[in-house]
Image (spheres, coloured by chain):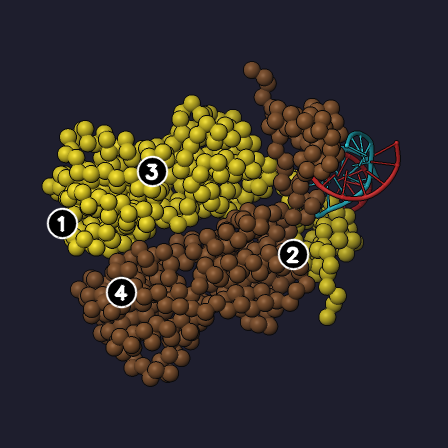
Chain colours: A brown, B yellow, C red, D cyan
Amino acid sequence: MQELAVSRPTIAGVASAAGVSVASVSRVLNGLPATAEMVERVQRAVEDLGYVPDSRARSLKVGRTFQLTLAVADVGNPVYVTMMRAVEEVVSAAGYRLVVTTTGPEVVDEVALVRGMARGYADGLVISPLRVDDDLIKSIRECDVPVVVAGNVPAKAGVDTVRANSPKGVALAVEHLLAKGRDRIAFVNGPVDTVPGAARAKGFADATKHYNLKAAGAIEAADFTFAAGRAAGKQLFKKSRPSAVICANDLLAVGVMHELAAYGLQVPAEVAVIGMDDSELAEQSFPPLTSVNLGSAERGRRAAELLLARIEDDTRTPRRIVVQPTLSVRRSTP
Amino acid sequence: MQELAVSRPTIAGVASAAGVSVASVSRVLNGLPATAEMVERVQRAVEDLGYVPDSRARSLKVGRTFQLTLAVADVGNPVYVTMMRAVEEVVSAAGYRLVVTTTGPEVVDEVALVRGMARGYADGLVISPLRVDDDLIKSIRECDVPVVVAGNVPAKAGVDTVRANSPKGVALAVEHLLAKGRDRIAFVNGPVDTVPGAARAKGFADATKHYNLKAAGAIEAADFTFAAGRAAGKQLFKKSRPSAVICANDLLAVGVMHELAAYGLQVPAEVAVIGMDDSELAEQSFPPLTSVNLGSAERGRRAAELLLARIEDDTRTPRRIVVQPTLSVRRSTP
DNA sequence: TTGTATGCGTTATCAA
DNA sequence: TTGATAACGCATACAA
């Protein structure tokens, strides 16, 4: 057996093995003009040595990594897998690889991520922040790779955003329930100090006023998780008996449905339940969950496209795209 | 407003702004000894210019990126979120950032990923491959950053692995069912040309022989998804009436349960259902799914630890860790 | 303690 | 078409 290659071959190793210059190796590797013999010799040497270019050195030189990052708060939330799939499709078609990273629920982590993203990790970032503050907006503006926000930040921040229309989504849910004769509608929200929580709270408040809804209970869950949904359900049915409950996302809704089952209440016969996000979980839950489709897939797609466009041309004025909701009716509502 | 910084500050810019050498800037940034005044001046300049080190250049120099990659086949499979969380916890405690990337079900994509991983993207890789062939093993062996496989590859491959004991897991499920008097046990597997599919097939074959199970139907689903589970369920109950069904993962099990509901069959009264993976979905499904815990969290943890250890010392002999299963009993079984 | 100079592996400019 | 060489931005050995 040969001695083990203690260090991996570099372009210089390939060059000397092929008996040509490093410049020629680089050219062949990048498909620039070269004689057939040159191509042959270089490829032979590359093959022999098992040479693989160093992406760090390459991107240091050319200034691009051909990597894009998607940052989400919680990988356990199925809405992000929908978004992830959509983003992946767009960016990979454009020749980028996508890496996903998770920030956790705290805004400081998001700021740290954006700050660290500057310089070298990727050519761009799609971030879906749970909480937004001035620090985060500042870090996004100062970031020297393009960032697009999948979520809502103030227009004056001057960043590309693509967001859902939660208030409209809540309205769709309310209308559907009222049409089915369910007028004692409770609302289980996530934390209102989050971007989606605030938007959905506004949506429910608007709807309450507009449709003159009678109060039937409103809960602010600890977070947007299944466990929080169960806890919220427990609290909710202790003090009221709504005929329907709208939840701020699908995980909360499924948690609430479990609690309903524990109380022996039939869905949808006794209580109707509507989730939001229309994630894969809505289809998988039992009964299948009627859910407000906030356009996660389209938001992901548009966000990715915005990012690619901005990488292409950093001077374009920031766009703010709003994706309109639809209602996916399943069997958790009559 | 100031003119826009057309190019981002480099360490040289900071140095000249602070009136010191680049070496001094580098030292201060890396916490090496310096006078208080030096530290002060450098930090001031860094702050003023909004300087952020270029991670590519840095890692090109020091040879490390302080990034680790986790590659999974399908982000929509909840077993991976369990694993992801565990890996994340271990590597971030060790000072690395974790990026997640998805390979898709094809082995060629996995090979491409491992090949591309060589040189620069990360300091190590945990990969959970659905399909394994010689090419993949070759690419792992040739990869010049450490790779640990969360899954089963032949011992002769000589790579670090941490895998589940699926046959034992299937046996646990069978024993539980038999103890409850369910002896007409059907089996819904994923594709048997995958690593987990093959292992679970073997497990069920072993159990069939060992417990002398009567044939009650066995289906090979198209993949490990919810939709495939539904399709398999439809096929299964067309031709047989098992009193229990074991599914190769939770998504398949939930799909099968939906089909049972469509047939008007009660779970667990008429048909018991057991999944595998004990993912978050098992808890969220209704009824909550009895599931074989194949130790995804522990596998993730151990895989991450193995990876860190190998980064520390590349000469250690490859380890093959096996994590033993347990059964999480919920309400889908009597 | 600080500064100068070299090199990490690559691409791009320029001559030949 | 090909080769020598200068950057890319940073860390460090060595000199001061």
> Residue at point 73% right, 24% down?
A19
Three-letter residue code for mark 1: Glu
Three-letter residue code for mark 4: Ser
User: For this rendering, which residue is in front, B311 or A76?
Assistant: A76
Three-letter residue code for mark 2: Glu
Q: Is residue B103 left or right of residue A261?
A: right
Q: Is residue A332 above or below residue A178?
A: above
> Residue at point 24% right, 47% down?
B233
Q: Position of residue A159 (x, y in %)?
A: 59, 66
Residue A312, numbered label: 2
Residue B44, numbered label: none
Q: Provide the secondary structure element on which disc 4 rests.
A: loop
Q: Provide the secondary structure element on which disc 1 rests.
A: loop
The residue that disc 3 covers is B191
Q: Is residue A138 left or right of residue B175?
A: right
Q: Position of residue B188 (x, y in %)?
A: 26, 41
Distance (Cα) linking label 1 and label 2 = 60 Å
User: For this rendering, which residue is in front, A180 or A130?
Assistant: A180
Dot 2: within a 10 Å radius of its alpha carbon, few (fewer than 14), some, or many (20 or more) residues?
few
Q: Chain of mark 3?
A: B
Q: Chain of mark 2?
A: A
Distance (Cα) linking label 1 and label 3 = 27 Å
- Of all residues shown, which one is farthest toward the top? A1
User: For this rendering, which residue is in front, A181 or B293?
Assistant: A181
Distance (Cα) linking label 2 and label 3 = 42 Å
Q: Quadrant of the N terminus of chain B?
A: bottom right
Instruction: Tell which circle, 1 or 3, labels the residue nearer the N-terminal end.
Output: 3
Q: Examine the image and state in which quarter residue A146 appears.
A: bottom right
Q: Is residue A39 above or below residue A73?
A: above
Q: Provide the secondary structure element on which disc 3 rests.
A: loop
The residue that disc 1 covers is B270
Distance (Cα) linking label 1 and label 4 = 23 Å
